[in-house]
Amino acid sequence: MNELNSNRPAKHFASDNYAGICPEAWAAMELANHDHVPGYGDDVWTAKAADLIRDLFEVECEVFFVFNGTAANSLALSAMCQSYQSILCHHLAHVETDECGAPEFFSNGSKILLLPGEEGRIQRSSVEMAVEKRSDLHYPKPKILSITQATELGTVYSVAQLQELTETAKRLGLRIHMDGARFANAVASLGVHPKEITWELGVEVLCFGGTKNGMGVGEAVVFFDLELAKDFAYRCKQSGQLASKMRFLAAPWVGLLEHEVWLSNARHANDCASRLAQQLRTIPGVKFMSDRQVNSVFLELPTAVIHEMRSRGWRFYTFIGEHGARFMCSWDTTDADINSLVQDLREAFQIAKV
């Protein structure tokens, strides 16, 4: 059914990917849509966006713009290790569960080793165990620790938690990659400067998410270790990630980064999730799966409630366990959207009689 002509909700809580382009990113892209400019990144918009990212992190770094998070993570990881080495990550990390084997493909077979951890966070002890359990030639040598910030369960690593992890990684000879698809939300939640949770703690490569923060498409691969960035442009080209009209990937970043729109978008999404969680606590029977720290709320919902909500047109993901449900807020979520969702969920519990 065409949703433009249906009675379904105008907004959904399945993902912040569902939201449109924020006005500032749209306006910047429209400004870039004038005259002829050089292609393949040799333009003023790409240069300006990269410089704004350097200013944001307060450090010299190499910046590459790619189409999506799968490419950002997979190409970054492939630049950090050899095929006989392995990548350590949380067992719910996107690079394991949602990249269709792309990290292994682009690294020519580097094995991903999965680590446990409550609420989406990796523990120091599990990193030590994975690295120290074997050192023989038959075992894929651990080389990268991949940290997701914010995590797949809507939590964040504090500065202290990151410091413990990164110090452990360095002691064990691991490189550090950060999947920052919702990095902006983590910064907004922690109230820190971006450098405080990246290169100052030893993060060598960050995949900085733009799509979920208000852009239509595009992520930035930020190399704080300049040596690792050598020849990365060739990886982008070979994998089909070098945009001929690169200005349309880069210009929206200018719209986000100027005047801290990226941060205000993230704060808004986080605040909406906070209000959603507060209202959900008033519904008898609602159980939270994790602490809400960014722009997502995870609930345990009975099967009957899930079916009733979907029959009312709501879309949301149920990928964590049998009854886990994720509700994600975005830069354009409104109080009316939240109220509508909560009202339907309240009625769904009443109908299901649970």
Image (cartoon, rainbow, N blue to C red):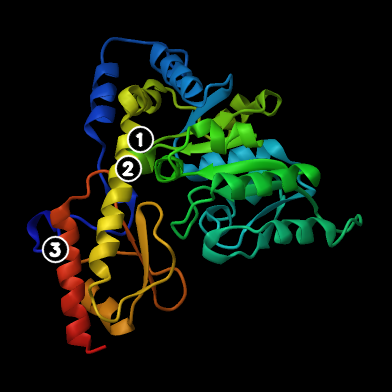
Kindly state the secondary structure of the residue where label 1 is placed.
helix
Residue at image location 61% in from the left, 35% down from the top: 205
Taking the view exactly as shown, the residue that stands out farthest to the bottom is: 353
Label 2 sits on what residue type? Arg
Mark 3 or 2, closer to the camera: 2
Answer few, some or many: residues within 10 Å of disc 3's Cα (few below 14, many 20 plus, some between 14 and 19).
some
Kindly state the secondary structure of the residue where label 3 is placed.
loop
Instruction: Looking at the picture, tell me which residue is in the foreground, 334 or 223.
Output: 334
Mark 1 or 3, closer to the camera: 1
Residue at image location 23% in from the left, 58% down from the top: 12
Answer few, some or many: residues within 10 Å of disc 2's Cα (few below 14, many 20 plus, some between 14 and 19).
many
Residue 15 place in picture, x, y as percent: 33, 54
Whether pointer 2 and pointer 1 mark residues with C-beta atoms closer than 8 Å, the reply is yes
Image quarter where the N terminus lies is bottom left
The Cα–Cα distance between marks 2 and 1, rounded to whole angstroms, is 6 Å
The Cα–Cα distance between marks 1 and 3, rounded to whole angstroms, is 31 Å
First of labels 1, 3 by sequence position: 3
Image quarter where the C terminus lies is bottom left
Residue 299 place in picture, x, y as percent: 36, 71
Whether pointer 1 and pointer 3 mark residues with C-beta atoms closer than 8 Å, the reply is no
Label annotation for residue 267 = 2
Residue 198 place in picture, x, y as percent: 58, 36
Above or below, comparing residue 220 to residue 43 in the picture:
below
Label 3 sits on what residue type? Arg
Label annotation for residue 8 = 3
For the question of whether residue 215 can be seen, the reply is: no
Residue at image location 37% in from the left, 40% down from the top: 211
Label 1 sits on what residue type? Leu
